[in-house]
Image (cartoon, rainbow, N blue to C red):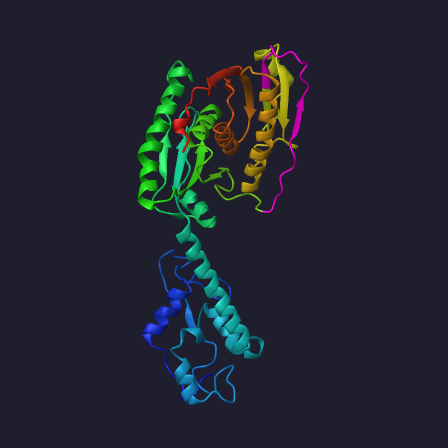
Amino acid sequence: MAGSNRSNTGKKALDAVWIRAAGHCELCSKDLTRDRITLTPAKLGQVAHILPASPDGPRSTDGHTVDAAEALTNDPGNLMLLCASCHVDIDKTPEGYPAQDLTYQHEAFLDAVKFAANSAHSNPGTGMIVLGQHFQTKVRIDPSQLQAAMWRDCIRPVGAPLIVELPEPDQEGRDDRYYRAVRSRLDKNIRRDLSPARSVLGDEPWLGVAAIADIPSLVILGKMLGDRRRRKIYSSDRTTGLVWRDGSAVASPFTFDFNGDGDETRPIALVISISAFIPERDVHAVLPNASVARFTAAAPSYDYVQNADFIGHFRDQIQRRLSELEAYSPLPIHVLPAIPAALAIEFGAVLSTNHQHCYWIYDRDGPTDAFRRHVSLDHLSKEYAA
């Protein structure tokens, strides 16, 4: 395609093109730094000219002389990193890829790379993985998935995620001693490992959180992290990992039903049915005289949380309903939840705000799977909140 008057691009210019394009094809975004078969590092891209390296190359114009070609051959603004297929396409059919269009595509691609770099730089963060030990099988969240999830949200991880394994219940089960141990373990890690990141970086870094544990422990985690900390909570999915199932999904409104009879001496049972529906009989089995307040998703499901907006939607809706219940009665509020882990953490964070009531958190216990009162949050002091 090029004649004998072709000018060769120097190594420094070639390296600059690779660096500026972040090793990806500027037309199809293919990663050119890794062999897809051997999964080993490679340099599979080709540096292509927008205006050709010789007067008789593709997209040449009447004014594109030997001197003009030589002047542009080492100009990164005239050089694109392409995969072999895209390189063939633009040179075999140059009429479909005019120089002006390629220049626009080139500049837009570099702007996107710069934006990603600047966004990551301005949002340093650290990850935290919390794993419970009371399940029949050992649970795990891949730390690299949390790093990738934070990166997708334009948060630059400053180090490996903090991994916190909660204590394993003994033969007495999840009693007061267990939850004291949970608080102690979380407090130790939050103070020892998250606080230094704040002092080193100056401003409070973003915190990316992913967790699999029992609901009361997750609520404790949320309250200890607090509401003022900048955070991204991720939902672990057996199919998609920490990748949201549907980034464009819109959360449906929750329904809230509470018909208090005016008797403030009756306990209030707040039944939160999001991952599954909690039947009335299960509530009255543990709180037979309670006034029942129901906060229910339109279609309760274990995969309710489709994207981050669902967490924010839950937060906004539950906050208002808690205030209504607190205004109705000064008595403790008994919470019977069937909620995903991410929402349990956010619920705890909500309770770290101006909610002064005592909240009792319930959970199901074997072998009958009946609800039992597990832990009170009223004595978790504000010093735990960031």
98 versus 203 height, above or below:
below
362 versus 234 height, above or below:
above
Q: Quadrant of residue 326?
A: top right
- Residue 289 appears anywhere in the view: yes
Q: Is residue 252 magenta?
A: yes
59 relative position to 299: left or right: left
Q: Residue 383, how many percent across, how many down? A: 39, 27
Q: Residue 385, how many percent across, how many down? A: 41, 30
305 versus 182 height, above or below:
below
- Residue 44 appears anywhere in the view: no
Bounds of the magenta segment: 248-269
Residue displayed at 63% across by 23% down: 294
Q: Nearer the viewer, residue 144 or 103?
A: 103
Q: Quadrant of the C terminus?
A: top left
Q: Nearer the viewer, residue 182 or 134?
A: 182
Q: Residue 242, how many percent across, how many down? A: 48, 42
